[in-house]
Structure formats: structure tokens, C-alpha cells
Image: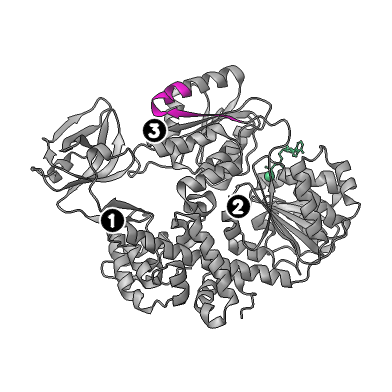
Amino acid sequence: MEKSTDLIKIKGIGPGRIKHFARLGLFSLQDLASFLPRSYLDYSRPVKICDAEDGETAAIRALFIGPVKTFRAKSGLTVTNVSIGDETGNITAAWFNQPYISRSVPSEAGGYALGTVDRRNGARLLRASFSKELPGIIPVYPLTSGLTQSVVRNAVRAALDICLDSVSETLPEQIRAEYGLIPLKTAMETVHFPKNAQELAAARRRLAFEDAAVLTIVLEKLRQNKKAQKGISFNTSGILDDFLKLLPFEPTSAQYSVMNEIALDMASPQPMSRLIQGDVGSGKTALALYAMFIAAKNGAQSVLMAPTEILAEQHYIQLKRFFGERAAILKGHMSAPVKRQVLKGIADGSIIAVTGTHALIEGKVEFKRLGLVITDEQHRFGVRQRAEIGKKAESPDTIIMSATPIPRTLSLILYGDLDVSLVKGMPPGRKPVTTRLVPGEKRIAMYRYIENKIKSERIQCYVVCPMIEENDDLERVRSAETLFEELKSNLSVRVALVHGRLKSAEKDAVMEAFRTGETDILVSTTVIEVGVDVPNACVMVIESAERFGLAQLHQLRGRVGRGDKQSECYLLTESRSKSSVSRLKTLTETSDGFEIAEKDLEARGPGELIGMRQHGISEFGAAALASDIETLKQARDCARKLLAMPPEKSERLIEKAMRKYERSLEDIVIN
Ligand code: ADP
Ligand code: MG
């Protein structure tokens, strides 16, 4: 169904552009007015050449401009160069394959050169542009093909002009004064068009605060709502021993302590809502099985929802160990009679434990007596899904298992409606993956080394790229397609390619060929992050590693190190930025997911952490832009305070919260 749109009201937006905006999820003037810049180019202050750091966006006062030179480099690229100087030194502006650019270089000194400092055989300003005046702070929006920054910027400006008047303030004056927050309306405008860095910071703080407060209210309501429901009080005594007899290993102390929390929750008459966080490989499945075992002993059914069919298959093997004939799986490719049989068994209660993908189980399956719902690898599901899962039966207990370690402070906000358990450490015997940083100039040698290793040791290798196709914006990031071609023609091993745009049957075929060892190197985007288990694949290369979050790199790395061979992970980066390199170094130094998540939070701020990035920033809204966790904490405390105040103080914010999460909150009673 086409969504209706009122963007046509904006001058310069016709039916063609409307389609492009729709691809960004922008349908209404409201959407546009709250569409946030992805980043900013700060050209509000001139930077001296000697102070301009690699990777930094800089406006350089050009006191000297040399002659423009255009030549063809050995690589075949046409290079256009011009030297720029100030009183502290010189820097070269360079463009590739854009000879026409020379026309825009001013002939005399004066004005500013604007661009991002990069280093290639010496310091340069890459793709600089020139301007007479300092342009201030320029918002940079997420784009899609067919749109340019200036089209989006003008559209946002127009949408704000129409919408701002009707925005009402959500926070009482007194609260704003207490937390030092600017008015909402001002923030909404300034976040796009700030005059200086302080203004921008104030606007971002206000919006982040707003969104975190909204989210807190929603989760607080969810929590209250759940606690008010009546759940099943399971009998848990004597069950542990029976469970341990069937478990093929002795639980670690971390597992024991979470099992204890689960048993206490299940025994309580309030419904359990627990998030279990633990690194990939930390042994969460056994915890799920324990909870399912308790439910089964009490005659209640349980489901274990997996993010992929492959993982569901793996879970099914475990379920059979514990529940034998009374275990079942629901799959996409199942013959109709078998499927009917399974559904019948679930409906009449002869099946006690079932697994399958989220999509297959949610909504459609009738249970005789559902007592427990477990969702595996939750980091892909948002607040919305959390609310819906709970609606399945009367009030089943719920467990969500996540392999994304989220720092405690942040999980208190994102998962304010849940109790959180941590599985610290790893089961015995797991060897940490040897991780190394590889600079660009070593990449050929590295691939040669891997080629030899594949030939001599018959191991397999993953190569992960940040993008599927080439993108002009990021000239030095190799796409999965380019790299696939490159490796295929240069290495004498079998190379395959998989990415999210393949049809799922094609994807499965490529994955299956890799799993059975028919291919040696699998080039992919991050689709392999979840659900792949190929013990023979013990080498991983991550291209343009600086483009990933640490938590995500850590997760990707978790795909190797599953067999008995020592595993290796190579983080390739051409970035020389000190902060990128030191961030990536963290991974070479530790394999503790929580420590890594904390470092990520420190280095990049909450918005960049994996979960939110992947949902887009929609769920967390502007909070994704907050650079500090302190603001989020204050917002949470403030929201709780507001909820305790007379309703007229908080009604605007609550109203907003409810609108935003409308679908998930149908059954939450407000007042
Ligand atoms: P994840 O937390 O990623 O879901 P799994 O539950 O799949 O991890 O466990 C990873 C591997 O470790 C599995 O092969 C599992 O059998 C094994 N394992 C889990 N707990 C222990 C333990 N206490 N002792 C030995 N092996 C264990
Ligand atoms: Mg798992």
C-alpha cells in the first residue's frame, strides 16, 4: 500500500522526488521536520594547517594558492592537485577523476578551503571546496540516490517553516530550568541550522533528552503493566538435578547464577521479563533449555524463537535431547502434512517445546498452554516486538537472549522494562581469536598469506565488507562486489559472494556451499553476523574495519573460533586517524564483550552502538545523537520524576510517548 504524503506542498518536491524521500522513510512534513542530520561539517572556525588532524573536517584560511596541476597517475586515475598554504604550512588539495574541478579553484589567495584532512603519501585536504566566507556548521543528512544534501536541506527548512508553529512544549518550565534544557521548538530548528558548536550541543542535548524521556515513559508503563498481570507460578523444586543429568556439561558459575535468577522468576506469580546478555559462545542456550525444562515439568509449553532458520535447526537438536518426541520445529520449507501435524501437536499440547523463526511462530500458532516465550538474539528486535511477544497467551514468562553486550548504563534505558542477567566469561576450552590490525599497504601480503593457509591447512575464511556496491561517497571503502571480483581473479582458491540483496534461496545455497567446504573464501556483508556456524572457517578479514562499531566487530569475530584450530581475525584499515586506530586496538587487546561495549560507548557515544544503528535511529530517535550517557541518565531520572508528579505536568510528554509507540501500547492503560 502506498503511504499518503504531503511533501508535495514543498516547493521543489514533485512526484519523482517524493519517491526518493519515501525511501528514506519520509512521508510527511512532520517526518521531514524531525529528520535528523547524520553528522555535521564544522566550518565555523578556521583551523591552522599545522593543527589540522587526519580525518578532521577543517576550514583552512587560504593565504596561498598555488597553480592547479592535473595529471594522470600510474593507477590510471586523473589527479587534480593544488597547494594551499597559511602561515603554519602547506597542504595539498586533491581530487580524483574530476578534472573539471579546476574551474572552481580561485585564482587568488583569500577565503577558505573546506574539506576533510586525509593522508596519502603526505598530508592533504581531500576534495576540498572553496568559499569566500566561513559557511558555519553544515548538516549532513543520510541520503539515497536521487537526492542531494542541498535538496534535503532545503526540504527540511521548508518543512520546519510550516510545522514549527504547531509544536507544543513537552516539558514544564521548571523541569527545563532544573536540567538546563532549551525549548523544544528552538532545539528542533537549531539541530539543523546551528550558528555554532555550543548551540548545536544544546539542541542535541534537548532532543536526546526528550527521546530518552519518552522511551523511559513507554518502558516504565510496559513494566507496570506487566507487573500488574498475573503470571504462572511454576514449581521449581528438585528440577535442577534432573536437568543436569541431561546436560552434557557442567554449567559455569556464571551460568549457575543466571539459572538461579530464572528459577526464582519462574517461581514467582508475577510474569518474568528477563533479558539475558552474554557474548556469542557464552552458553546462553543451556539457560534457555533450563527455563523450558522447568515449564515442561509443570506441564506448560514453551517456544524458543530464533532469528534464522539455521539457528532454529541447531536449537531443535538440543530440544530433542531434553524433550524427545515432544519437541518440534516450525520451518519455512516443510511439507504441508508435516506442518499440520506439528500445529496440531502444539494445539493439543502433545508438543511441549517448539522452536522456529520469529516470523513463523509469531501470531499464527495456537498453543494449548503456553507458559514461556524465549527470543534468541534479541538485538535485532525493538521495543515494539517486545510488547507483541507478550500478548501471545495469558501472561507467559518471557526471556530475551542477546549476544550484544550493552553497557549497563545504556541497557537500563533501552531495556528499562526488563530485568537483566549477565553471563560473564566463557565456558572452559574456548581459545580467544588472535586479532590483528592490518594497514592498507599490507593487504596484498595478508591475502597471500591466507591463500597459502587455505591451501596448506584446508581451512576456510570469511571476508566481511561494509557495503554491497561501490559508492562514490566512500572511494576507499571496498564493496563486497568489488572485493569478490578482485579476490576471484587474483587468488587461486574458490571464492563466493553473499549479501542481503540475494534472494533467500540463493543466499542459502551460497551458505550451504561454504558450510560443506565447496568454497574457500566467503565474501559477504554483515549478513553473516547471525546464525552461521562453520567450525572450519577460522580466519576472518574485516575490510574497512574502522567503519564498524567495536561491538559489531566483536560479534563478527565471534563467527570464527568455533572449531579446535587457533582462529585469526584481521582488521584491515586504511584509516590513519589516531582515534580510529586506538579504538580498533581495543579488539586486539581483549575478548570481553562488555569491556568492548564500554569502550565503544566511550569512544563513539550511545548512538553509534550496534543495536540502535541497525534499527536506524528510529527507535531511539535523537537520543542516538547524544554524545554522552549522562544526558540519557538524567532524562531517565527526569521521566520517572514526571510520572510521579500531578498529571498536568507530564501529560504532553506521555501523550507523545504513546503516539510514538502507539502500536505496541494498545493495551497499556494510561492515567
Ligand atoms: P551462545 O551464548 O552464543 O548461544 P551456546 O549456548 O551456543 O552459546 O554455547 C556455545 C558452545 O559452548 C556450545 O557448543 C555449548 O554446548 C558449549 N557450552 C555451553 N556451556 C558450556 C559449559 N558450561 N561447559 C562446556 N561447554 C559449554
Ligand atoms: Mg545462541
Res 533 → quadrant = top right
Of all residues shown, which one is farthest toward the top? 456
Considering the numbered disc 2 on the image, is that residue within a helix, a strand or a loop?
helix
Task: Decide: is 177 above or below 607.
Answer: below
Which amino acid type corresponds to the residue marked 1 in the rendered image? Ile
Which of the two discs, 3 and 1, labels the residue nearer the N terminus?
A: 1
Q: Position of residue 421 (x, y in %)?
A: 70, 52
Q: Which residue is mark 3?
A: 574
Which numbered marker is on residue 665?
none
Of all residues shown, which one is farthest toward the right? 238
Which amino acid type corresponds to the residue marked 2 in the rendered image? Arg
Nearer to us: label 2 or label 1 = 2
Q: Which residue is mark 1?
A: 137
Q: Work out whether residue 506 can be spotted.
A: no
Nearer to us: label 2 or label 3 = 2
Q: Is residue 534 left or right of residue 27?
A: right
Q: Which residues are magenta?
A: 433-447
Q: Which residue is at a point 54% across and 47% down the rendered structure image? A: 503
Which amino acid type corresponds to the residue marked 3 in the rendered image? Glu
Q: Which residue is mark 2?
A: 408
